[in-house]
Image (cartoon, rainbow, N blue to C red):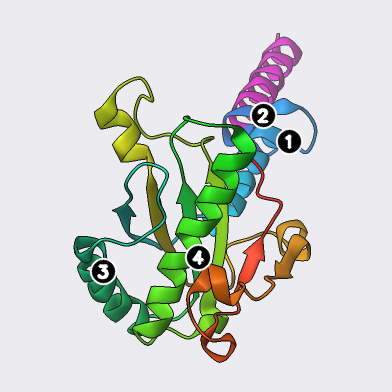
């Protein structure tokens, strides 16, 4: 009888220890530990690539990259915020879906360039500025209405406090932009803006 009770007690302790181990995810093998460790790690990596601050956006007329007076006023305020913070400034150009994908990609770059050039004139160091274009590939509204397309014709300005806001792979793709021609820029060669350009933006 005593042996039976002792055996039953030991078996009960074994079951309790096993269940508590599984609840605590202490085991080194199996899915529960993998999932519990992997998910926070991946989330931490993803969070590190998120912008610390989305500063705002400016909008453009159809098939146009010129800044309006309203946009310049917004960029003046944004430049003050940038100059009070450290980190890389990402200037992302967007377009609606009218015209071809390659055309809209170039248009997004032109818009981003104009914004970055204005930010430089407002006192932001060009070494901090990086431009990229998503073209028509990241709409925030429907492209099947005038109002929606107007929202998609935009440039978004973000600031990353931790480096450049890119992974090492992304950073290896970054190239120095060629100087925009005097005809395109409408300025002398000395005043042209040299920017880092992410020419291989992943969609």
Q: Is residue 76 above or below residue 30?
A: below
Rounded to the nearest angstrom, the CA distance separating label 2 from label 4 is 48 Å
Marks 1 and 3 in Cβ contact (< 8 Å): no
Q: Secondary structure at mark 4?
A: helix
Marks 2 and 1 in Cβ contact (< 8 Å): yes
Q: Which residue is mark 2?
A: 32
Rounded to the nearest angstrom, the CA distance separating label 1 from label 3 is 58 Å
List x then y, in percent, for residue 196.
Answer: 63, 71
List x then y, in percent, for residue 108.
Answer: 51, 50
Q: Which residue is mark 1?
A: 27
Q: Which residue is mark 4?
A: 113
Q: Quadrant of the C terminus?
A: top right
Q: Which residue is mark 3?
A: 72
Q: Nearer the viewer, mark 2 or mark 1?
A: 2
Rounded to the nearest angstrom, the CA distance separating label 2 from label 1 is 8 Å
Res. 159 visible in picture:
no
């Amino acid at each position: 009888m005593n042996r039976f009770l002792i055996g039953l007690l030991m078996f009960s302790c074994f079951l309790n220890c096993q269940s508590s181990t599984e609840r605590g995810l202490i085991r080194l093998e199996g899915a529960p530990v993998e999932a519990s460790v992997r998910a926070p790690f991946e989330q931490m990596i993803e969070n590190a690539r998120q912008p610390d601050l989305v500063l705002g956006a400016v909008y453009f007329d159809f098939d146009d990259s010129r800044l309006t007076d309203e946009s310049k006023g917004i960029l003046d305020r944004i430049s003050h915020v940038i100059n009070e913070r450290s980190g890389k400034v990402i200037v992302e150009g967007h377009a609606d879906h009218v015209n071809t994908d390659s055309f809209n990609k170039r248009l997004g770059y032109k818009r981003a360039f104009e914004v970055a050039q204005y930010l430089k004139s407002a006192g932001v160091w060009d070494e901090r500025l990086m431009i990229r274009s998503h073209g028509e590939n990241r709409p925030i509204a429907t492209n099947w209405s005038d109002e929606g397309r107007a929202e998609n014709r935009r440039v978004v300005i973000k600031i990353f406090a931790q480096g450049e806001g890119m992974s090492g792979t992304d950073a290896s793709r970054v190239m120095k932009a060629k100087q925009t021609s005097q005809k395109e820029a409408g300025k002398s060669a000395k005043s042209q803006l040299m920017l880092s350009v992410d020419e291989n933006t992943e969609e």
